[in-house]
Image (cartoon, rainbow, N blue to C red):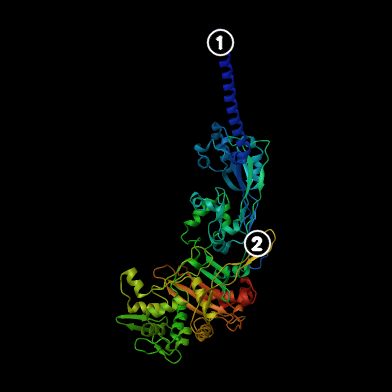
Amino acid sequence: MGDSFYSGEYLTKSRVVFLSALFSFFLVIYLGNLLNLQVVQGSLYKTRATEVTQRATSIPAMRGEFYDRNGDLPMVLNVDSFALKIIPAEVPSEYFPQLFSLLENYYKLPISEWEKKIPTNVYKSYQEIELRDGLKYEDIVVLSERIQDFPGVFWTSKPKRNYVESGSLSHIIGYVGNITQDELQILYNQGYNLSSVLGKTGLEKKYDQMLRGVDGTRLKIVDVRGRQVQESETLEIPPENGKDLILTIDRKIQKLAEEALGARLGSVIVLKPATGEILAMVSYPFFDANLFYTDRASQEFNRLFTDPQLPFWNRAIKSEYPPASTFKAIMGAAILEKIPNAENNTLDPENQFFTCTGSMSIGDRHFKCWKASGHGPQNLSQAIANSCNIYFYNAGYKYLGPERIAETARIFGLGQITGVDLPGESSGLVPTPKWKQRNLNYPWLGGDTVNMSIGQGFTTVTPLQMANVVSMIVNEGVIYKPHFIKAVRDRASGKIIDTIIPEILTESSIDKSIFKHLKEDMRGVVTWGTASLVITTKVVQVAGKTGTGEAGSIKGSNNHGWFVSFGPYNAENAEDQIVVVTQIEAANEVDDWWAPKAADIIFQGIFANQTFEEVKTLHRPWYLR
């Protein structure tokens, strides 16, 4: 019995030791794991916990503003505005119908619009939803007086654009708008979000990244359901505001060009050939971008979008027209290079004359000159000044041929975009026999060469391309890329942080003497040729080339009006010269000679430092009396 007792006592002690050891073993494991969690991996889990409980909202950066070339007064600025937002989960589900009704009464939008903004599948979400932007301070005050009726609704500051200088600048500057879902899918990785505003057209779109800056961030601690912890602090990372852009545009010249064109479908370009700086660009009709920030924004947009006169269309860079007789300057360059034809005969531009009788026959077709009675014997200089079609018919058909004409046109930059810093530029067309066969499945005919020789037929150009053509003549073989940005300025310091250096777009190998000859011929157009009765300014010597382009069945005059020009003709330095291109569409119910008339007004206004009204009063050209 004693042995049995001692045996049981030993067994009990063994169990106690075993259990104690087992307990100690698990305790050591537990403490080790706890140490690992708190010390070794503590920072990792702390970061994860912060990510879970930390919610970030963006603070919109102030968008950069636009200034004209003098950099003094803004053309586009930001004004105070507010955005209305909501956190759906803070609204009782049964209260949404009443909330929609209240919003309808306050902001005059139908309930269906509010239901689209807050669909039922987001009722439990703590993610902020922007309901409306562009609200005035008074709108917020009215809402705040009954804020208890609007659970989950709040507002934040969201400046909006004020296009101080709208009108004809609308095609240049463009406008901004809220980002769409499609745009967000493309731009999400570039820092855009659902509340982002971005440029939709014009320079606003082209330089959006530079203008928008970098949004700031507001961080707050929230609980598991996304509600802010009351005791927590809100941390903010301030935004970096966008950069201001100083344009090449001269606001006085822009206004003068706008009024000189008037309410006529067409465009005007004023450009510095020595740098490519665009001093003015007008396309009519234009629009007021400020209308897109009113209660009738969608209606105004739809009205403009469906307008048959296409007010959103920048005719200066997008519309393609036959260059008509302005193309004869390019023909002149091809002729002056004295390239022999297949029979090894060379056209002598100074001494060889083609007699214009008013028409010319090729096969069974008759091609007419604009002057029915004819111009008589013409050499190159006379043909350019008088815009004689017969001379260029002969030169193109008998001597140059379509390939040589096309090659020279491409040297002047036709058939390709200029690279101007506006989206949506057209390239125009320089046709060739291969192009016609490939695209129209029809061979090139002699009549095609004849038409091409006077800027008709398949050839098309944009007004900006023609401004480059004149620039090459003025610069004697060089075209600088046309552009709108002169400098970039930091908003905070007011310092210029980047100045745009003129960039050579094209440099021709054509001998400079040829361009000198063309400049003399274009001066003849004004002194004794087709523009002599219209260009009446005495403050500057103007040289140019008129053009009247056939436009088929378009109602009105059925002719597009052109005048491509530069001045002062006698300037010693190209830096002092400007190029002016005016284009009037055939659809206008006015005479097609308004193009040189508008250019005359612009030259007078610029070099006499006069407004349009002063030109009318002081200069008093006959066509404004």
Is 144 placed above or below 492 here? above
Dot 1 amino acid type: Asp
Question: Which label lies toward us, 1 or 2?
Answer: 1
| CB within 8 Å, label 1 to label 2 | no
Specify the label residue 375 is tagged with. Answer: none
Which residue is nearer to you in this view: 459 or 416? 416
Task: Please identify the residue farthest to the left as the structure is shown.
Answer: 364
Q: Label 2 neighbourhood size at 10 Å, few (<14), some (14-19), many (20+)?
A: some
Q: Determine if residue 288 is in view.
A: no
Q: Determine if residue 431 is in view.
A: yes
Is 190 placed above or below 414 here? above
Q: How many marks?
A: 2
Task: Please identify the residue farthest to the front as the structure is shown.
Answer: 3
Is 538 placed above or below 264 here? below
- Residue beneath disc 1: 3
Residue 380 in percent (x, y) is at 45, 87
Residue 621 in percent (x, y) is at 58, 77
Which residue is nearer to you in this view: 182 or 609? 182
- Residue beneath disc 2: 74
Secondary structure beneath dot 1 equals helix
In this rendering, position of residue 358 left or right of residue 495: left
- The image quadrant where one finds the N terminus is top right
Dot 2 amino acid type: Pro
